[in-house]
Amino acid sequence: MYLNKAMIYGNLTRDPELKALPSGMNVCSFSLATNRVYNDRDGNRQEAADYHNIVVFGKQADNCAKYLTKGSGTYVEGRLQTRSWDKDGQKQYRTEVVADRVQFGPKNSGESGGGAGAPTSGSQSSGAPAAKADADEGKAPAMPDYPDEEINPEDIPF
């Protein structure tokens, strides 16, 4: 059995690009950044970012181009694919995630929710939200309101 599955949650590093194939099908491409924090050999905290190229086809491509913007939190499921081509006599390679499913992250409307702080709607200007994002960056995410009553395990139906 073989498995080629990629699951990535990250922030867009640039606005999506929408193009049309000769067949008429739309294709949208964008890049996601994922961050990880680890301790090095000396015990110092280090941060590293990885960048992933994403390609989406069809109706999902239209939706991604319409609703996603730079900084948007996005979850992508798909498969890894490596393409190759010749450029100036040298072979070039590009590995990308061909998305089967794209799920948009939470909209950041003034509250810090773990995203990058940039708007997910294309209707807002690009200058004003950046200052807001810088101000929200230091705040801790708001905790959800949980019910006060105890949960009885016998009430759970499964």
Image (tube, grey):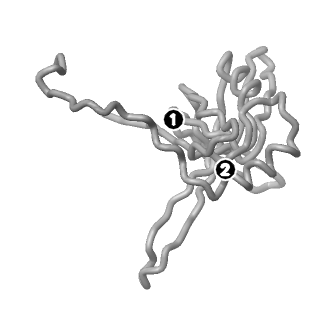
Q: Nearer the viewer, residue 86 or 158?
A: 158
**Residue at image mark 1:** 79
Measured as percent of width and height from the top left, residue 114 is found at 57, 46
Q: Hey, which quadrant is residue 119 in on the image?
A: top right
Give the residue at x 65% y 33%: 107
Within 10 angstroms of label 2, few (less than 14), some, or many (20 or more) residues? few
**Residue at image mark 2:** 93
Q: Nearer the viewer, residue 4 or 40?
A: 40
Vertical comparison of 3 with 141: above or below? above
Spot the residue most to the front: 148
Of badges 2 and 1, nearer the viewer stands 1
Separation (CA) of disc 2 from disc 1? 16 Å
> Which disc, if any, is residue 51?
none
Q: Nearer the viewer, residue 47 or 21?
A: 47
Measured as percent of width and height from the top left, residue 103 is found at 56, 28
Vertical comparison of 78 with 59: above or below? below
Q: Name the side, left or right, on which 66 lies relative to 151.
A: right
Give the residue type at disc 1.
Answer: Arg
Spot the residue most to the bottom: 42
> In the rendered structure, are the residues bearing label 2 and label 1 in contact, judged by CB atoms less than 8 Å apart?
no
Secondary structure beneath dot 2 equals: strand
Measured as percent of width and height from the top left, residue 63 is found at 70, 21
Within 10 angstroms of label 1, few (less than 14), some, or many (20 or more) residues? some
Q: Quadrant of the C terminus?
A: top left
Q: Name the side, left or right, on which 88 lies relative to 44.
A: right
Q: Name the side, left or right, on which 28 lies relative to 123.
A: left
Q: Earlier in the sequence, mark 2 or mark 1?
A: 1
Give the residue at x 59% y 56%: 50
Give the residue type at disc 2.
Answer: Tyr
Q: Hey, which quadrant is residue 26 in on the image?
A: top right
Measured as percent of width and height from the top left, residue 53 is found at 65, 44
Give the residue at x 56% y 56%: 35
